[in-house]
Image (spheres, rainbow, N blue to C red):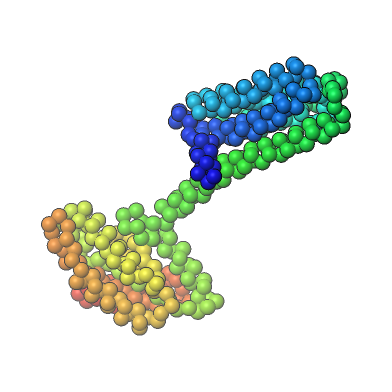
Amino acid sequence: MKKLFQMFKELIFKDVIRENEAKDTAVLLRSLALLSFAYHLAMFITSLRYLPLLESIYSALALFLIIVIFVASYKDKTILCLYAFCILSVLDAGIKTLFTGSSHGFQYIIFFSVLLIFFRTEGNMKLKYIFSILCGIIVCALSTTPGTSVFHDVDHSVLHIFFALSNCIYITIALIIISRFYCMKFSESEHKIIQYSKKLEHLASVDALTGLQNRRSMMTHLERLAKNYEHSEMPFSIVIADIDHFKKVNDTYGHDTGDYVLKKLAEIFRNFMAEKGYVARWGGEEFLFTFEGSNADFIFVELNNLKSLIEHTQFHFNEQDLHITLTFGLEEFDSGAGLLSIISKADQKLYIGKEQGRNRVIY
């Protein structure tokens, strides 16, 4: 049973042949066509017993047209099928209302056409409005139709209940199907917009070369840390690091080698800073670290470990072995000094380290 249901589901959701045809429209039409087939089959059986032969012939023709629409939806005829189903819905509602009267609610089936026309975002919007207004006029006109006395050999009240319930069930299920597809369509669009916004946000906050946070993103993070410090007084420190003699690496081995060094260091920093804080490419060969929840004395030891790790890491690119070292300037945050002042002090300590011979941590 489960396998049969899966095969049925795959049949309904099968893609269309043309790439420029909308699959969701085709699947919606197939779903409505199956529902409509069941509905018209019930009407056909009823018409054979209780309605004139002409109504039975029409019901048989409607069943045939629904099958044609269902089959054609697998070809490159999605738009044609959509219009055909809409026209069939209008004609069906009109004929049944003229035969039986407006009290059974056949005329309201016409509103399916309005929903289906607007489901396709393509097409002339003005024509869609005109079509919708015409559908409204037709429904109003049919609602005043008394119908003809075409029933025979049956209690009118029983047949009235059957038609009313059938239409109520048919319209309810059809509206659920159409609403579900509208929901799926707009959810998909909304999801794409959200994903695209996240992608743009990510691109705006990440350095393209290293994949680390960029300066703008890190400043936002620093401002958040400074604001939180006012309430929680959770300690954090700012570290600015600079690659020693990086210009010489670029001039001697080329910018591709320089890019390799930056990316390799970024990978080391990411692994090292896990659960310690954050790191960003501050600009050029400079990096800014935030160590959060630890005092500066502990961070000083950690930075020396990082310095030693980099010093003993093998940098090999284009058959060249490179010896890479960094100089670090460390400053613990103090709300009295302010964020920009702390960054400036960390930068000053970095340059003190440069003057003292590089490859060291200054605190």
Query: Which of the image's four quarters has the C terminus?
Result: bottom left
**Residue at x 56%, y 41% (from the top left corner):** 185
Q: How many marks?
A: 0
Q: Residue furthest top?
A: 54
Give how far across and how far down residue 124 sits, in percent: 60, 25
**Residue at x 45%, y 50% (from the top left corner):** 200
Q: Is residue 306 above or below residue 159?
A: below
Q: Is residue 202 left or right of residue 302?
A: right
Q: Is residue 285 left or right of residue 117?
A: left
Give how far across and how far down residue 55 sits, in percent: 74, 19
The front one of 216 and 85 is 85
Q: Specify whether residue 114 is in view.
A: no
Q: Residue furthest bottom?
A: 297
Give how far across and how far down residue 83 sits, in percent: 61, 24
* Residue 184 image-quadrant placement: top right
Q: Residue furthest left?
A: 319
The front one of 345 and 54 is 54
Q: Is residue 245 left or right of residue 214?
A: left
The front one of 159 and 183 is 159
Q: Is residue 206 above or below residue 245?
A: above
Q: Is residue 132 left or right of residue 103?
A: left
Q: Is residue 235 above or below residue 246?
A: below
The front one of 81 and 149 is 149
Q: Is residue 151 above or below residue 285?
A: above
**Residue at x 53%, y 38% (from the top left corner):** 8
Give how far across and how far down residue 68 sits, in percent: 57, 23
Q: Specify whether residue 301 is in view.
A: yes
Query: Which of the image's four quarters has the N terminus?
Result: top right
**Residue at x 46%, y 73% (from the top left corner):** 338
* Residue 296 image-quadrant placement: bottom left
